[in-house]
Image (tube, rainbow, N blue to C red):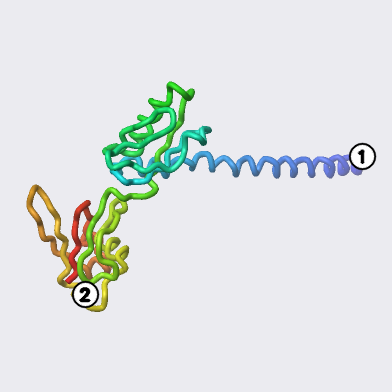
Amino acid sequence: MKSAILFLGAALIPAVVCGAQSAAPAAAAAPTIATAAPLAAAQGDSYVIGANDVLDVTVWKEPTLSGNILVRPDGMISMPLVGDVKAAGLTPLHLASQVSDKLKKFVQDPVVSVVVVAIHSKVIYMIGEVSKPGPLDMIPDMTMLEAISSAGGLTEFARKKKIYILRDHGGKRERIPVHYKQALEGNRALDLPLYPGDTIVVP
């Protein structure tokens, strides 16, 4: 009798193990669905699209309607079926909603996402003792240190204590002193945020 029970137990163990192994991949696969959207959502609430930006417009299950699109100088984008759509001045989430509304005439329950893949509408300028002076495309929430780094860093002749930012505000030009050393040492309050049109001067 004991041998019969042992035999049944041995026969059942592989089935239980196999069932657990087959269930594991299904459980592991689920998070990929849940984490697919945050990138578009992160950009969608803050960044305002401008002319010459490059957008990745995706219409779910509609590859012919999806792809990278350049925002024209007039602020419009062109898409199959819907034609021209105003993009400049909108956030990615707002634009996705506009495109979705226009596509409803042609696609049942369209799901649209918009991600900014290249920013060319917002520019700052680097002047003086940096490795690559000239205009610089901004990234969202760009700071003074990030801009200097993107310009290749300071040259050996840079006068770090004399760096300043020129900013046009209300028809006037402000001169904002930069505390480069303290910002570099980790004082985040002194790593000043930049605005489109700012000029960083490195004597």
Q: Tell me where residue 113 sits by quadrant.
A: top left
Is 87 rendered above or below residue 167?
A: above
**At label 2, which amino acid type do we have?**
Ala
Residue 61, percent across and down? 53, 33
Residue 179: mark: none
- The residue to which callout 2 is attached is 158
Residue drawn where x is 35% and y is 40% of the image: 44
Residue drawn where x is 35% and y is 37% of the image: 77
User: Please, which residue is most extreme toward the left here?
Assistant: 172
Is 162 rendered above or below residue 14?
A: below
Q: Tell me where residue 15 sits by quadrant.
A: top right
- The residue to which callout 1 is attached is 1
Disc 2: CA contacts within 10 A as few (<14), some (14-19) or many (>=20): some
Judged from the image, the secondary structure of the residue bearing numbered disc 1 is loop
The count of marks equals 2
3D distance between C-alphas at marks 1 and 2: 91 Å
- Give the quadrant of the N terminus: top right
User: Please, which residue is most extreme toward the top here?
Assistant: 105
Residue 181, percent across and down? 22, 71
Judged from the image, the secondary structure of the residue bearing numbered disc 2 is loop
- Give the quadrant of the C terminus: bottom left
Image check: 187 left or right of 83?
left
Residue 11, percent across and down? 84, 42
Foreground residue, 139 or 143?
A: 139
Nearer the observer: mark 1 or 2; the answer is 2
Image check: 7 left or right of 131?
right
**At label 1, which amino acid type do we have?**
Met
Residue 161, percent across and down? 16, 72
The numbered mark, 1 or 2, whose residue comes first in the sequence reads 1
Residue drawn where x is 21% and y is 75% of the image: 158
Foreground residue, 21 or 110?
A: 110
